[in-house]
Structure formats: C-alpha cells, structure tokens
Amino acid sequence: MAAAGTPSSEAAGIERSEPTEPDRQYCAGMIRFGREAFQRGRYQDAKQFFRQAIEADRTNSKAWLYYDRSVIFALAEKVEQGSGLLAPGRSLTTSGATVPDLQVEQTAAPLMPLAEEGEEEEVEEEEGC
C-alpha cells in the first residue's frame, strides 16, 4: 500500500512530470520523421510518428499540431479512396457498369433588390464625418 502523499505504482505510470531529455530528443526525432512522411503524402505513417512523439512528450505543442493535421489528412485520403462517400449515386468500379448519375435540378437564387441611389449617397455622407 502506498504511503499518503506518494502516488501508487499505477498512478505513477499515468501521471508523469516533466519529460526527460531523452524523451524530448526522441520526440524531436519522431516529429522530423512524421514531417517527412507528411510531405511525401504518407499521412497514416505520419500520424503514427506524431503519436509516438506525443507519447514521449505530451507537452510538445508542435507534436499535437502535426498529429491533428495528419489525422485530418489521413481521413480525407480515406474519403477520397471510398468514392461512394463522395458520390453515393455513382459507382466508379472498373467493371464498366455504372449507376446512372442523379440529375439535380438547379434553381436560380432569389435576386436581392438593389439599393436606391439616395441610400448610397447617405452612406457616403456618413463616412465623411
């Protein structure tokens, strides 16, 4: 049983104080690898590198920023690959059989009345005050 004021062994694993210097160096390396993967368009790999960087140093805001970006780009990549998510009425299979496109009728937006000339002059006069 842990003494009062000292964390138990379970809590000690969860609550960490300042990251050590090797943790910071490891974090910097993972950020570097993650940025390289991100620039190459390998968003899933970049996400893993940034996650490792966060695990090494949870206080590093750069690691969190890059991790968030890589998550968004990885999700966008999955959406692009799953064409059914973008165009549900269309099949882009290579078999040649496609579902016909859904016809969407375009309606004109309602026209907004133009301001009368007298109103515009009043605005110009107020701006000069």
Image (tube, rainbow, N blue to C red):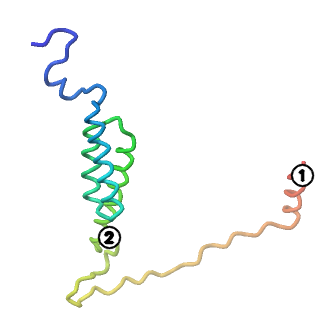
Residue 95: image location, x then y, percent? 20, 88
Closest to the observer, 55 or 14: 55
Image vertical order of residue 62 relative to residue 90, above or below:
above
Q: Which mark is residue 96?
A: none
Pointers 1 and 2 in contact (CB under 8 A)? no
- Label 1 vs 2, first from the N-terminus: 2
Which quadrant of the figure has residue 75? Answer: bottom left
What amino acid does circle 1 point to? Answer: Gly
Q: Alpha-carbon neighbours of circle 2 within 10 Å: few (<14), some, or many (≥20)? A: few
Closest to the observer, 76 or 58: 58
Image vertical order of residue 54 relative to residue 36, above or below:
above
Which quadrant of the figure has residue 112? Answer: bottom right
What amino acid does circle 2 point to? Answer: Glu
Residue 84: image location, x then y, percent? 28, 73
Closest to the observer, 122 or 2: 2
Which quarter of the figure is the N terminus placed in? top left
Image vertical order of residue 89 relative to residue 56, above or below:
below
Q: Residue at x 39, y 40 (%)?
A: 61
Q: Residue at x 89, y 61 (%)?
A: 121
> Would residue 127 appear left or right of 51 to someone viewing this image?
right
Q: Which mark is residue 80?
A: 2
Residue 69: image location, x then y, percent? 37, 54
Q: Residue at x 23, y 83 (%)?
A: 93
Dot 2: element: helix
Question: Which residue position holds label 1?
Answer: 128
